[in-house]
Image (cartoon, rainbow, N blue to C red):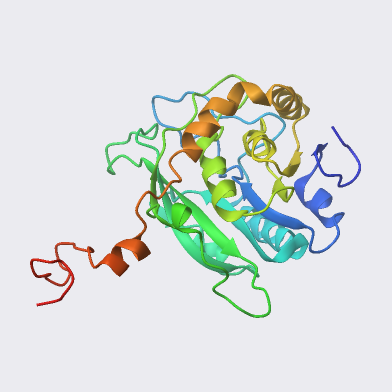
Amino acid sequence: MNNNKFTPNSIVVGDVLETLRSIPNDIIDLTVTSPPYNKRNKSHGWLVTNEKYSHFDDHIPEEKYQQLQIAVLDEIFRITKPGGSLFYNHKHRWTNGVLINPFSWLVNTKWTIKQELIWDRVIAANMRGWRFWQIDERIYWLYKPKDNYLIGKELESMHAKFASIWHMRPEHRTNSHPAPFPIELPTRIIYSILTSKNCIVMDPFCGTGTTLVAAKLLGHRYFGIDVSPEYVKHAIERLEKSEDEKNRLQKEKLKHVIEDSFAARKKRGTISWPYGPKLDNDSTKKK
């Protein structure tokens, strides 16, 4: 635990914006995070009776909430290396019949929005009769361009094979935190994005430390911030026992395998799909 300054492989207990402002420019390789959603402690469904966070009131005016998110995101942009990324998990919310989309504030940050991923959580807690069950959340891939190149480097084939909809059940709720990540989610992101070891992975709303545990098990340094001493204590305990979670991480890594690449199949002339070109009998020539 670190209450004062940025140090790799540590967690700061404190205000997120104040802590981020104390970190030097261009030192973070990747951030994976999910802030409190400003659900105002009342927009849970009948399956969830309590979603309160420790040491944080998730009930502030929406305009103030969005201004805070922009400030936090821009500070993360400043401390991220050129070519680095931020994966930002959030969701669509409805307040008094008005849809609030995270794009409302993301477009006002310094980041380049590279992709919107859909997290299919499979199950829903917000079961209300005036909308279909919302089982999805969003993960926004935000990118800090290097040399004004907005696209960035290409993913390796074994990672690029995944679609933009990720089917992952959420972690079981515990008394320690109302909405922890499943460890497979940050594992997929970190393993796909960082091709070298010993990078710095950050989670400025680290909660009970799922992103940090995934980073450590994948051979990277980590840095976390959270306002709750209770969550940070739990995160430190998880990091000390991180090997206990290695099996789940390994199962996710085993999904990142290409046995027969698209490039190899194309070279052989064996690419076929319902709306693709028809091939003759020797599968090498177009009709």
Q: Where residue 107 sits in the image (x, y, percent)?
A: 55, 69
- Camera-side residue of 261 and 132: 261
Quadrant, the C terminus: bottom left
Q: Does the image show residue 15?
A: yes
Q: On the rendered structure, is 149 left or right of 238?
A: left
Question: Where is 272 relative to 214, above or below?
Answer: below
Q: Does the image show residue 39?
A: no
Question: Where is 41 relative to 141, above or below?
Answer: above
Q: Which residue, as the protein is rendered here, is positioned at the far bottom?
A: 148
- Camera-side residue of 54 and 154: 154
Q: On the rendered structure, is 71 left or right of 170?
A: right
Q: Which residue, as the protein is rendered here, is positioned at the far right?
A: 4
Quadrant, the N terminus: top right
- Camera-side residue of 281 and 36: 281
Q: For residue 207, what is the image quadrant?
A: top right
Q: Where residue 12 sits in the image (x, y, percent)?
A: 82, 39
Q: Where residue 268 sits in the image (x, y, percent)?
A: 27, 66
Q: On the rendered structure, is 92 left or right of 201?
A: left
Question: Where is 13 relative to 62, above or below?
Answer: above
Q: How many marks?
A: 0
Residue at position x 52%, y 66% from top? Answer: 154
Q: Where residue 73 sits in the image (x, y, percent)?
A: 67, 59
Question: Where is 183 relative to 221, above or below?
Answer: above
- Camera-side residue of 99 and 14: 14
